[in-house]
Amino acid sequence: MAFKRLKKFFAGPTPHLSREDAMKIFKRDHFKCHYCGLDGLHRFENWLILTIDHIHPHAKGGARTLDNLVTACQPCNVIKGKRIFKSAQEAKAYVLAKREEWRQAFQEQVKAA
């Protein structure tokens, strides 16, 4: 069994980000998705899907520091996933390109239906 699994088994899961820290990040980012710009202050439904994303994924050793965390909507957070990027801008470019690719596939499916 890997050391990380043993550690998790004995110590339990790592604590999640506190609500206070999450609010600091949301406020710093003006409640907007770092990737697509979805405005969480514009509509309640937008606010409901805002999350906190690790630029360098926590699962790959990324720190839970404020400079490694950004506001992201759930779709963008899922698209980025656990991929590692050299910079936040590279991650943003990847997410926006993938969103556009999916938008085109969706539009083709709608036309075919």
Image (tube, rainbow, N blue to C red):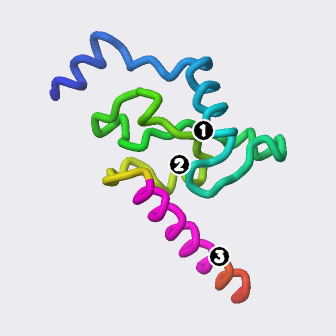
Q: Where is residue 66 in the image (x, y as percent from the top left)?
A: 47, 29
In the figure, 5 relative to 10: above or below? below
Mark 3 element type: helix
| Quadrant containing the C terminus in the rendered view | bottom right
Boundaries of the magenta span: 89-106
* Amino acid at dot 2: Asn
Q: Would residue 110 be found to the left or right of residue 90 on screen? A: right
Q: Residue at x 74, y 48 (%)?
A: 39
Residue most extreme to the top: 11
Q: For mark 2, does the 10 Å Cα neighbourhood hold few (<14), some (14 to 19), or many (20 or more) residues?
A: many
Residue nearest the viewer, comparing 107 with 10: 107
Residue most extreme to the bottom: 112
Q: Main secondary structure of the magenta part?
A: helix
Residue tagged 2: 77
In the figure, 73 relative to 79: above or below? above
Q: Does the magenta stretch include residue 102?
A: yes
Q: How far is mark 1 from mark 3, CA to CA?
A: 24 Å
Residue tagged 1: 51
* Amino acid at dot 1: Thr
Q: How far is mark 2 from mark 1, CA to CA?
A: 8 Å
CB-based contact (under 8 Å), mark 2 and mark 1 = yes
Q: Position of residue 102 (x, y in %)?
A: 57, 72
Mark 2 element type: helix
Q: Mark 2 or mark 3: which comes first in sequence?
A: 2
Q: For mark 1, does the 10 Å Cα neighbourhood hold few (<14), some (14 to 19), or many (20 or more) residues?
A: some
Mark 1 element type: strand
Q: Would residue 35 be found to the left or right of residue 68 on screen? A: right
| Quadrant containing the N terminus in the rendered view | top left
Q: Mark 2 or mark 1: which comes first in sequence?
A: 1
Residue tagged 3: 106
**Eye-nearest disc, 1 or 3:** 1
